[in-house]
Amino acid sequence: MNCLKRFLCITFLNLVALVPAFGLAGDLERPSLAMPASTPETFRTNLMAAISEKELNFLDGHFVNGSTTLHYGGSTEALNRLIARLSGMDGVRVWITFVKEPGGPAWTLSHNAWADAGGIALQINIAAATLKLEQLGITIAGASKGR
């Protein structure tokens, strides 16, 4: 019985340990997003320009395959411009959440090119010293007046 257990254990470990995994990960020194090869050049150019403005104060970022996380330390005015610019782009959907992280970045931009190349998630840090929440301007697309 011990021989069978040992054989199964060795076989399992060989299957798990010898399977090659292809992937790429790293840190970013400037804003960048992965995009599928089929992404229109104008969309790619406009999106990269929106996330690369100097006033946004890019801090750092990292990626794992098509998933990217970018940290920013900009002002409320810069964040408002970013939200307006992204919201005005055809094919871009922006999701906004809030977090309280003292000492953390003013906001974090997350993007997964393979899941949804047009989806941008912004996590706004309400504890960031550079942000004044009373000046934050978020327009909700599709909202109707009245009712």
Image: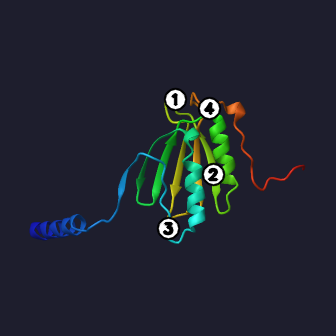
Please tell me in which quadrant of the rendered image residue 98 appears. top right
**Residue at the right extreme of this rendering:** 146
Mark 3 or mark 2, earlier in chain: 3
Decide: few, some or many residues near mark 4? Use Cα within 10 Å; few <14, some 14-19, many ≥20.
Answer: many
SS at circle 1? loop
**Residue 95: image tag:** 2
**Residue receiving disc 1:** 102
Identify the residue at image location x=58%, y=56%.
Answer: 47
Query: In terms of secondary structure, where does tag 3 sit?
Result: loop
- Judge from the rendering whether residue 22 lies leftward or rightward of residue 36; answer left or right: left
Residue that carries the numbered disc 4 in the rendered image: 131
Of mark 4 and mark 1, the one earlier in the sequence is 1
Q: Residue 28: x and y, percent?
A: 41, 48
The CA distance from mark 2 to mark 4 is 18 Å
- The amino acid on which the numbered mark 4 sits, given as a three-letter code, is Leu
Above or below, comparing residue 108 to residue 87 in the picture:
above
Q: Earlier in the sequence, mark 1 or mark 2?
A: 2
Figure check: 16 above or below 55: below
